[in-house]
Image (cartoon, helix red, strand yellow):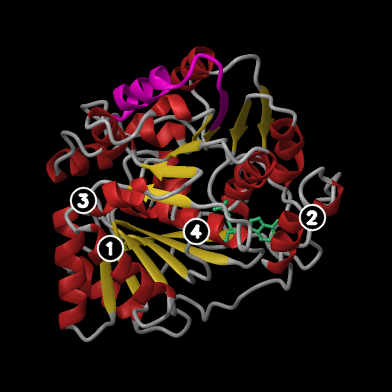
Amino acid sequence: MYNKHSSPHRGGSASRFSRPHSRPKSGGRFNPPTGGKRGGGNNSANRRRFGQHIDVSRFINKAVITEAVEHFVPEHKFTDFSIDNRLKKNILDKDYELPTPIQDKIIPHVLRGLDVVGIANTGTGKTAAFLIPLINKVIMDPRQRILVVVPTRELAIQIEDELRGFTTGLNIFGVCVVGGAPIGRQINALSRRHHFLIGTPGRLRDLIERKVINLSFYQSIVLDEADRMLDMGFIDEVRFLVAGMPAVHHTLFFSATMSREIETLIGAFLKEPARVSVKTGETSKQVDQDIVRIPSGQNKIDVLHNLLIKPGFDRVLIFGQTKFGVERLSRALKERGFAAESIHGDKNHGQRQKALKLFKDSHAKILVATDVAARGLDITRVSHVINYDLPSTYDDYVHRIGRTGRAGAKGFALTFVE
Ligand code: AMP
């Protein structure tokens, strides 16, 4: 168990994507929720009650990082793919030297026009795995339009950013339509020429119902983080979007996890898809995980405070269970003099982006977040993940701690146990 935290050090000089990707052994729910949807019916009393049954030993694991990292050897180089030379140049300009496993395996299938299922999470390079071949499709035929459906605004914006990098000088454009941002501006943006439409399911449905978007112009659809869309209760919207596509269309489906429900969706939405599973970062191996027992009579926040002043706690992502709790904790930390920011569903889009930028640019060393808000975010160099509140499922735990220990570096995850 954690008591004295030794000064953490970054391990390994291994480059990004140099580790083998193998799937974490994430068991089922250890904490059966009362409702199906994320965020529904999970009050803190329930959580505490369920928490008693959590096997906290699953949160303890010493990271195994050695300098001798096994290198993934891709079958292809980017130059091997039959894609436009200008696109190849943009890829190289982004300093992508070699394809990641998911890119190596999926790009050839998509280029051939096959439907694909990618079992991969954030951090595997899945965004470029679908963007690169689809951008090429647009280069070959500028009438092509691509719909990219994602669970969160942040993920939508990240994809738009990636798209911008890959399409420099190509006259290919994207529009991003997400909930929580002014719809009028998005309606304007949609009237401009665009090839990629990236959006969250609710806002997309709204714009279709307002007849601002006509899905019959879209020949390809990407469903990104389908498992999370399911978790977040977006399934009706997703079905609505797929049903609105032309009868013949190209479908790319990504999910971090596989389940019976996901299989059902794959069966319903895709035609004989090629399947690629890159084992999603064996988080447990790269992340030094420990629990922090809160001594009775002691305040959790005091324990947290004492950790945050230790050396090495440079970029700390703290997870809380509720929007309210997250906001309250970030305010309390600010009052104690810490540069803390927060992201959760009660913040509007601009506020979330601002908080994220402050954290990414190291102006805030602490970001307090809910699971949903942090989902899919590509935040690099997080020194520590702290589970201030227990996650609801082991899967959530794996997602949370996957924010640290990336790019071949050792990470630290601490879980508070009351
Ligand atoms: P993703 O899993 O798509 O969120 O990507 C995670 C991060 O990896 C992003 O910052 C990408 O820009 C980066 N990335 C994706 N593919 C490559 C590659 N082939 N080489 C280097 N970095 C990459």
Quick one: SS at disc 1?
helix
The residue under the point 54% across, 28% down is 219
The answer to whether the residue bearing label 2 lies less than 8 angstroms from the nearest atom of ligand 1 is no
Q: Nearer the viewer, residue 50 or 22?
A: 22
Query: Could you tell me how far apart the alpha carbons at marks 4 and 3 are, in whole angstroms?
Result: 46 Å
**Circle nearer the N terminus (4, 1):** 4
Query: Neighbour class for label 3 at 10 Å: few (<14), some, many (≥20)?
Result: few
Q: From the image, state whether disc 4 or disc 1 is nearer to you.
A: 1
Q: Quadrant of the N terminus?
A: bottom left
- Residue 144: x %, y % from top left: 57, 35
Q: Label 4, on which residue?
A: 289
Please provide the residue range marked out in magenta. Answer: 233-253
The residue under the point 39% across, 20% down is 244
Q: Label 3, on which residue?
A: 184
Q: Quadrant of ligand 1?
A: bottom right
- Residue 136: x %, y % from top left: 68, 44
Q: Amino acid at mark 2?
A: Asn
The residue under the point 66% across, 47% down is 132
Report the number of discs.
4
Which disc is residue 352 wearing? 1
Query: Neighbour class for label 4 at 10 Å: few (<14), some, many (≥20)?
Result: many
Q: Label 2, on which residue?
A: 85
Q: Amino acid at mark 1?
A: Arg
- Residue 222: x %, y % from top left: 51, 34
Query: Is 71 contained in the magenta span?
Result: no
Q: Nearer the viewer, residue 186 or 263?
A: 186
Q: From the image, state whether disc 4 or disc 2 is nearer to you.
A: 2
Contact between marks 3 and 1 (CB within 8 A): the answer is no
Quick one: SS at disc 2?
helix
